[in-house]
Image (cartoon, rainbow, N blue to C red):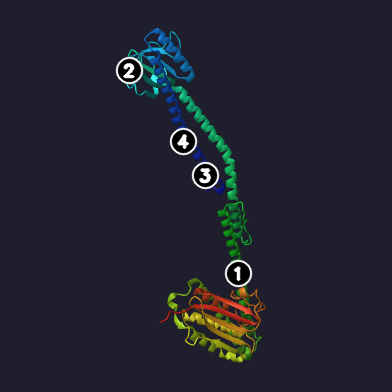
């Protein structure tokens, strides 16, 4: 596989060479046509001018022919075109050589060369083999009428080798121009391609480092690069940051799971070893068996919670599980299930529920779990004699807003964005919440987001409030 720089450089140079070649070929073709047209017009003009001189000077006597020779000689030296005058039979009677005994005199042209010419129009041929000159020549023929009514043919010509030489010179100059332009363009192209490949190489190197676990790598965003490369660099940095956060959360998740599993597993292992080696007397074993059973149940709840979260994240809430139910009735039933805990802590309960109920469309079991987890969290952290609140109000956009609040310690602002994270506890020592796993609020958030709704938390002035939205059911 070709490397990016070499492939891009080769492609760019080939395209540049192709462009220059096409341009050079088109210019060569245009130059050929313009040159041929220019020489043709020059030769034709010489023939027509010589025809006019022939009519003016006459060819009836030797004196007129002599004067015509002199004029043709002057014209030939000025234009570079050779001109001869022929009689009706095509025999040359005057030549622009200017010599008295010109070798062209007396030569007779092929009648086919002269037959198409008329008084109204001269004829021009790109290449005509003229035996009197012994070479192909660009030839123009004009007709001249003498004063006595005789017909004269005027033939002007120029060697085709001149035209061919001009074309060869043009080709040489074109090739030289292409080579010079390529020599000047290749370093510029090399520099441009090199600059364009530089950030891509940086990203490649950064990606390799990330593959080896270095999640802190970033690529530079250079203002001199193209907008597309800058957008790619920004996207790469955002991806790297997201991967770093994901890796950090994964490590925290593994550490938290390990920490949470360590305590019950240690307890279970210690008590089991004590019973097996006789350290725990037989009469006390039922007590410790109950502790072991409680720890196993705690492990079972953790596994079930993690499986439930994984299922919701992977599959979401199936539409067939959503149905219409009364949100007020569900919230009231959940609140009643905490009656004993509320009475034990002597909490004051404040409710604000619509008299006509609040019908919503959602998964009843999932929403029951959400309300249960939030009330359980509120009761757990509400101090003895504190206040517990439950409210369901109408919100904008055809939704209900469910709010559960409790008095007690205020959550620090820096902790608020983290309360919904897995295994997160505001008490880092984990002693304040012995029975909790730090999964309750994470499950709540997962369920609400799977319903495509919002959830948020506020904590100020000794009051912490969790709120989430649910859609209103259409009126029956």
Q: Which quadrant of the view contains residue 286? A: bottom right
Secondary structure state at the residue bearing disc 4: helix
Secondary structure state at the residue bearing disc 2: helix
User: Whole-percent x and y of residue 349?
Assistant: 58, 89
Disc 1 or disc 2, which is closer to the eye? 2
Disc 1 or disc 3, which is closer to the eye? 3
C-alpha separation, residue under disc 2 versus residue under disc 4: 38 Å
Q: Residue at x 42, y 17 (%)?
A: 83
Q: Which quadrant of the view contains residue 32? A: top left
Query: Which of the image's four quarters has the C terminus?
Result: bottom left
- Residue for badge 4: 26
Is 399 on the left or on the right of 267, as rendered?
left
Q: Earlier in the sequence, mark 4 or mark 3?
A: 3
Disc 4 or disc 1, which is closer to the eye? 4
- Residue for badge 2: 111
User: Whole-percent x and y of residue 107?
Assistant: 37, 12
**Residue 133 in view:** no
Question: In the depicted view, which residue is nearer to us: 252 or 400?
Answer: 400
C-alpha separation, residue under disc 1 versus residue under disc 3: 45 Å
- Residue for badge 1: 249
Disc 2 or disc 3, which is closer to the eye? 2
Q: Earlier in the sequence, mark 1 or mark 3?
A: 3
């Amino acid at each position: 596989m070709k490397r990016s720089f070499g492939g891009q450089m080769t492609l760019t140079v080939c395209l540049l060479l192709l462009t220059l070649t096409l341009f050079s070929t088109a210019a060569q073709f245009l130059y050929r046509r313009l040159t041929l047209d220019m020489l043709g017009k020059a030769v034709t003009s010489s023939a027509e001018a010589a025809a006019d001189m022939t009519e003016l000077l006459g060819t009836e006597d030797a004196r007129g022919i002599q004067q015509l020779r002199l004029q043709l000689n002057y014209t030939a030296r000025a234009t570079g075109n050779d001109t001869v005058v022929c009689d009706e039979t095509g025999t040359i009677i005057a030549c622009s050589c200017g010599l008295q005994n010109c070798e062209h005199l007396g030569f007779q042209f092929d009648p086919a060369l002269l037959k198409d010419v008329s008084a109204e129009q001269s004829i021009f041929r790109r290449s005509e083999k003229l035996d009197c000159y012994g070479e192909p020549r660009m030839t123009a023929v004009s007709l001249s009428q003498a004063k006595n009514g005789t017909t004269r043919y005027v033939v002007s010509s120029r060697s085709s080798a001149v035209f061919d030489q001009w074309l060869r010179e043009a080709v040489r100059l074109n090739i030289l121009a292409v080579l010079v332009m390529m020599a000047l363009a290749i370093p510029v192209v090399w520099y441009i391609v090199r600059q364009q490949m530089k950030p891509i190489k940086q990203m490649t190197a950064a990606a390799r480092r990330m593959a080896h676990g270095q999640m802190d790598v970033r690529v530079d965003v250079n203002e001199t690069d193209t907008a597309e490369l800058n957008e790619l660099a920004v996207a790469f940095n955002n991806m790297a940051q997201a991967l770093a956060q994901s890796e950090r959360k994964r490590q925290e998740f593994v550490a938290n799971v390990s920490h949470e599993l360590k305590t019950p597993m240690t307890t279970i292992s210690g008590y089991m070893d004590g019973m097996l080696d006789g350290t725990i007397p037989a009469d006390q074993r039922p007590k410790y068996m109950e502790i072991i059973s409680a720890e196993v149940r705690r492990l079972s709840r953790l596994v079930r919670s993690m499986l439930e979260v994984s299922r919701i994240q992977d599959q979401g809430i199936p539409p067939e599980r959503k149905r219409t139910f009364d949100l007020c009735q569900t919230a009231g039933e959940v609140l009643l299930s905490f009656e004993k805990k509320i009475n034990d802590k002597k909490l004051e309960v404040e409710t604000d529920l619509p008299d006509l109920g609040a019908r919503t469309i959602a998964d009843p079991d999932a929403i029951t779990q959400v309300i249960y987890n939030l009330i359980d969290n509120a009761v757990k952290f509400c101090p003895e004699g504190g206040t517990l609140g439950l409210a369901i109000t109408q919100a904008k956009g055809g939704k209900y807003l469910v709010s559960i609040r409790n008095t007690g310690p205020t959550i620090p602002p820096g902790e608020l964005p983290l309360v919904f994270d897995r295994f997160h506890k505001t008490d880092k020592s984990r002693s304040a919440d012995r029975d909790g796993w730090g999964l309750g609020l994470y499950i709540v958030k997962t369920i609400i987001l799977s319903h495509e709704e919002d959830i948020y938390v506020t904590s100020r002035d000794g009051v912490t409030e969790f709120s989430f939205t649910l859609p209103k059911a259409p009126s029956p």
